[in-house]
Structures are given as structure tokens and as C-alpha cells.
Image (cartoon, helix red, strand yellow):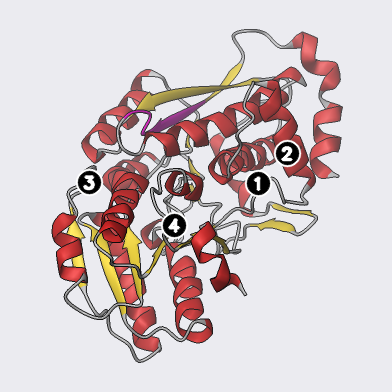
């Protein structure tokens, strides 16, 4: 397979790598605060792959170094971190950022600098349309996730009364536009639309509004802590619709926080790594065990795949790696592995299209 051949060919270079010869990637995401698990897990998965890569010679003899900064999922911090990574750390590319509002805040920097912005953890359309030369996404878009969710709710479950709970920022706005447009295609409007503040769990008011109307399902746009709080509070108050969310919420983080048998469905952009048949999944599980991580999840797998795709494209460039060559190689990159298909093109800088679902134990009946 492609990745096996590429890594094997670099084994002979392992002893020739100078400690000063690095490819520096800059990462800014939430390592503290209510969204920290996303940033921590994404970084962990990428680091596991880069460890494997570096032990086997790196990228054409150069080691990959991940320079990671914490932004707490606050856009103003992301702007400062990004300037530091570009100007002070002089990183080769920006990699594995987390969040729509954070990505939106640095968009002017990305456009002005032209620095590669690779595999951010967001499905926002403004990073996909129009196609920008230096921005490459791996995961499916929020529109694709919303489409899959609403089709499932309406066509399979015959739900009509669908409410929205939206994070009050750019992430919420992007997702709300997509959800509303797709509901319109089905001849529906949101039964209730209510908002809450980012990085907070103050959503009691949202629950009050939800309970005022008949609701079959609640589509939530936000992070896992307020989502879990809303679900638990709703169950205590005998309000028990099906709760759904986009993949910005790591499903296991939610399921671990449920106090009662609540019904939850979450769209995903990665398969369950324990059931995945990709060869890369077997590598992922082995590499995570090697660094002492036994409780694996989809976010870690996404970080691992992000690192793999970057590395494979970079290996196709000469030893003197340039940003221009990397972007050119990414644009023609394609890879298949037991059901996994990553493919970029000049008019499509999103590598994956697949959407999956996960269900809480109480919602398993909805799978049938």
C-alpha cells in the first residue's frame, strides 16, 4: 500500500537526520477550557502518527515537529497564536486547528500570508467555497452532516417538529444556515430556534423555550459540555426528544456525561476506530497503545489521518520541501484503503465526503 511503501523507503534515512532539520507545523486549538478534549485528542492522534513517521525517517529525511499553542476556543487567542506561529516560530504550515469561529477570525491572515492551512477541525463552508489555493480540508462539511441528519430524521423517523439550539457565534450561524436550508427542502421550518453563549453551559433559558412547543428532535450546534448539560437537565424535567448534534461534538465525550438513558444521535466524519477496517485504523490502534492510550476515539483517529495525509503529500516533493510543492501535491492527492477514499482536486479541496452516525444506548432503536 502507498503508506507502507513510502515509510519503508525512508528507513535507511533514519540515522541521517540532523536534529536541526525539521518541518515545523503550527497548531492552535483548545487545550484548556470547555472544548479542551477536542484539541487534546486531535493533537494526540496527530502526534502518534508523527512519532511513527519520525522513527522511520520522517519526510524525506526531515523530522516533523508539531508546535502547539492553546487558544481555549477563543478567536482573539487564535489570532495572536497564529501571528506568533508565523512570525516567531516561522512554521511551514498551520495544521489541525479546531473551530469555526477561530478559523473565521484568522481568515484575513490566511488570505494575506498564503501559508498552508491544513485539515482544520471544522465543516464550515467559508473554508470550502470559494476554493482557496492554501486551504485544504479533510472532513466532510457541516452541510453534508446536516443533510444526512435531517434526511434521517424526516425520511426514516418521520419527524416533523424539529427544534434548533444554536451557539451564538460564527459556528452557530454557519450551521443554522445549512440546517434551515435543508429543512426548507423538506417543506419544514424549525419549530423553535434558541441560542446560547459560546464556552458556557447557561442554556436553561433554551430549555424553557423548547418545552413550550411539541418537539420530536432537537438539533444542537455547540460543544459537548453544554450539550450534555442540556440533555441531562431536559431528562430531569421529563422532556425527552431525540437530541442530535454535528461532529464538532466528540460523541464519546457526550455519552460519558449522560446521567440518564437519554436518546442522542450524533453525525460523525470518522468511523468507530474499534470497528474500522482500514489498514490505517490498525496502525492507529497500535500507535496509540504504544504511547499508552487505550481509550481511543474518532477525534484521535481524525488527527492521525490528518497527519498521514500531510506526510504522504509532502513525501512526493523534493528533499527541499516548499509550500508551493506541498499545495500542488495535495491538490492531486488521492488514496484508498479498505473503504477509505481521500481525494482532492483543483476545484475541490475537501478530501472526504462520508458521514456516519453514532447513537447513545437509549437511541439504539432508531438505528433499525
- Marks 1 and 4, how far apart at CA: 48 Å
Quadrant in the rendering for residue 60: top right
- Marks 3 and 1, how far apart at CA: 43 Å
- Marks 2 and 1, how far apart at CA: 7 Å
Q: Which label sits in the foreground, 1 or 4?
A: 4
Residue 50 image position (x, y, % from top left): 64, 27
The earlier-in-sequence mark between 2 and 4 is 4
Say what secondary structure mark 3 lies in: loop
Identify which residue, 207 or 113, lies in the foreground.
207
The residue pinned by badge 1 equals: 329
Q: Quick one: quadrant of the C terminus?
A: bottom right
The earlier-in-sequence mark between 1 and 4 is 4
Q: Which label sits in the foreground, 3 or 2?
A: 3
The residue pinned by badge 3 equals: 201
Q: Residues within 10 Å of mark 4 (few under 14, many from 20)?
A: some
User: Measured along the vertical axis of the image, is residue 190 above or below residue 203?
Assistant: below
The residue pinned by badge 4 equals: 261
The earlier-in-sequence mark between 2 and 1 is 2
Relative horizontal placement of residue 268, taking residue 225 as reference (left or right): right
Relative horizontal placement of residue 83, taking residue 260 as reference (left or right): left
The earlier-in-sequence mark between 3 and 4 is 3
**Which residue: 25% across, 61% down?**
166
The earlier-in-sequence mark between 3 and 2 is 3
Q: Residues within 10 Å of mark 2 (few under 14, many from 20)?
A: some
Q: Are marks 2 and 4 in contact (CB under 8 Å)?
A: no
Residue 350 image position (x, y, % from top left): 55, 58
**Which residue: 40% across, 42% down?**
98
Amino acid at each position: 500500500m502507498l503508506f507502507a511503501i513510502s515509510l519503508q523507503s525512508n528507513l535507511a534515512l533514519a540515522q541521517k537526520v540532523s536534529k536541526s532539520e525539521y518541518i515545523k507545523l503550527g497548531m492552535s486549538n483548545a487545550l484548556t477550557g470547555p472544548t479542551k478534549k477536542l484539541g487534546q485528542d486531535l493533537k494526540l492522534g496527530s502526534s502518534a502518527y508523527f512519532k511513527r513517521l519520525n522513527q522511520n525517517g520522517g519526510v524525506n529525511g526531515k523530522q516533523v515537529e508539531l508546535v502547539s499553542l492553546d487558544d481555549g476556543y477563543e478567536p482573539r487567542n487564535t489570532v495572536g497564536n497564529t501571528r506568533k506561529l508565523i512570525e516567531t516560530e516561522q512554521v511551514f504550515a498551520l495544521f489541525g486547528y479546531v473551530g469555526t469561529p477561530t478559523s473565521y477570525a484568522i481568515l484575513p491572515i490566511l488570505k494575506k500570508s498564503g501559508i498552508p492551512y491544513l485539515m482544520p477541525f471544522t465543516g464550515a463552508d467559508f473554508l470550502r467555497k470559494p476554493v482557496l489555493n492554501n486551504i485544504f480540508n479533510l472532513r466532510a462539511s457541516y452541510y453534508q452532516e446536516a443533510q444526512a441528519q435531517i434526511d434521517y430524521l424526516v425520511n426514516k423517523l418521520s419527524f416533523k417538529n424539529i427544534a434548533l439550539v444554536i451557539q451564538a457565534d460564527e459556528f452557530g450561524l454557519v450551521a443554522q444556515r445549512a440546517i434551515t436550508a435543508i429543512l426548507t427542502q423538506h417543506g419544514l421550518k424549525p419549530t423553535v430556534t434558541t441560542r446560547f453563549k459560546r464556552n458556557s453551559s447557561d442554556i436553561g433559558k433554551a430549555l424553557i423555550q423548547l418545552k413550550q412547543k411539541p418537539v420530536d428532535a432537537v438539533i444542537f450546534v455547540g460543544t459537548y459540555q453544554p450539550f450534555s448539560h442540556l440533555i441531562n437537565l431536559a431528562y430531569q424535567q421529563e422532556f425527552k426528544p431525540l437530541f442530535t448534534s454535528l461532529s464538532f461534538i466528540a460523541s464519546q465525550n457526550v455519552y460519558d456525561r449522560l446521567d440518564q438513558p437519554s436518546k442522542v444521535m450524533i453525525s460523525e466524519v470518522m468511523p468507530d476506530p474499534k470497528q474500522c477496517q482500514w489498514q490505517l485504523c490498525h496502525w492507529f490502534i497500535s500507535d496509540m497503545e504504544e504511547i499508552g492510550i487505550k481509550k481511543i476515539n474518532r477525534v484521535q483517529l481524525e488527527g492521525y489521518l490528518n497527519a498521514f495525509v500531510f506526510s504522504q503529500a509532502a513525501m512526493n516533493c523534493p528533499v527541499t520541501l516548499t509550500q508551493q510543492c506541498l499545495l500542488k501535491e495535495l491538490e492531486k492527492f488521492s488514496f484508498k484503503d479498505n473503504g477509505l477514499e481521500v481525494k482532492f482536486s483543483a476545484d475541490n479541496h475537501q478530501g472526504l465526503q462520508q458521514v456516519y452516525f453514532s447513537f447513545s444506548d437509549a437511541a439504539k432503536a432508531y438505528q433499525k
